[in-house]
Image: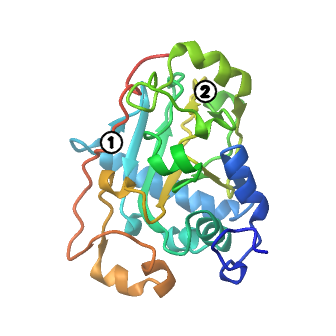
Amino acid sequence: MSPYPGIDPAALDLDVTADVQALYSDGITARKGAFTPDWADRLREDIDVAFREALERPGGAVGRGPHRYYVEIHPEQLRGFVDLVDHPWVRSVCTAVLGPEYRIVELGFDVPLEGAVNQPWHRDFPIPEETRTERRLTSLAFNVTAVDTQEDMGPFEIAPGTQWDDGPEFDHGMFPPRSLYPRYEERAVRKYPQRGDISARSALTIHRGTRNHSAKSRPVLVLGVDGPEATNSDRHDTAVTRGYWESLPERVRRHLDCPVVDVLQPITQKHTIEGLVMGDA
């Protein structure tokens, strides 16, 4: 019997049974050493270029708290885009969790700078009805660090198993009340990914960025992927030019859910998460 309901294991490049189990139990999994450190260094160069450009124009970057920014970019701004989305582990996890018709809907990065503070505990969007009633994940967020994460750099912190948490007391459907903070602090796990590592998580799992005590930034790439019923693409404006589209492998084009245009326009950020502009939580 297939460990992936409705999915033929032959459609997967890798056996990701343990990863699927981790996503449903903990809400997060990872592939260590998926890329070389040199690949991650090129990612850092591309992020730095895009970040400088975004800060120079109105709406180019959105605040996610003091000294913390999010920037959405186009695939063409990332030399390693195809390497990432066509990586066997990424393809296999997406197919196993979301089905063969998964869609790539978001490409961006978070940059906590020196002085970034603890974010409020949160999820990235309200829990979908399919997750609430069927206990089924309909989207994934992949994160790729551009630096070797150290303790003083404000590591990402996640509360495993909280992707199912729900209740009317969640502000905007995303922010649990402070009365629940002890639950998340008790479960909290800090992550220290190194250059070349990839993680996959449910963005519903309660998490936060922590205080950056260093003078270093901690840029991390975000790749958002939806199953057929998810609607996260409504919040994103990724596009590709016709020439770039034609250069992509067919199995990448099949999953890339974005307009094909003659000329790329700089993205005005609209993926604002209410509450993350707050100070130390």
> Could you tell me if residue 31 is visible in this image?
no
- Residue type at mark 1: give it: Ala
Label 1, secondary structure: give it. loop
Give the labeled residue for mark 1.
61
Q: Which image quadrant: the N terminus? A: bottom right
Q: Position of residue 140 (x, y in %)?
A: 54, 55
What residue do we see at 45% from left, 47% from top? 129
What residue do we see at 44% from left, 66% from top? 228
Q: Quadrant of residue 68?
A: top left
Please indicate whether residue 254 sits to the left or right of residue 163 in the image. Answer: left
Of the pair 266 and 222, the residue shown nearer to us: 222
Label 2, secondary structure: give it. loop
Give the labeled residue for mark 2.
214
- Residue type at mark 2: give it: Ser
Q: Give the farthest residue toward the top.
A: 179
Looking at the picture, does residue 167 appear above or below residue 178? below
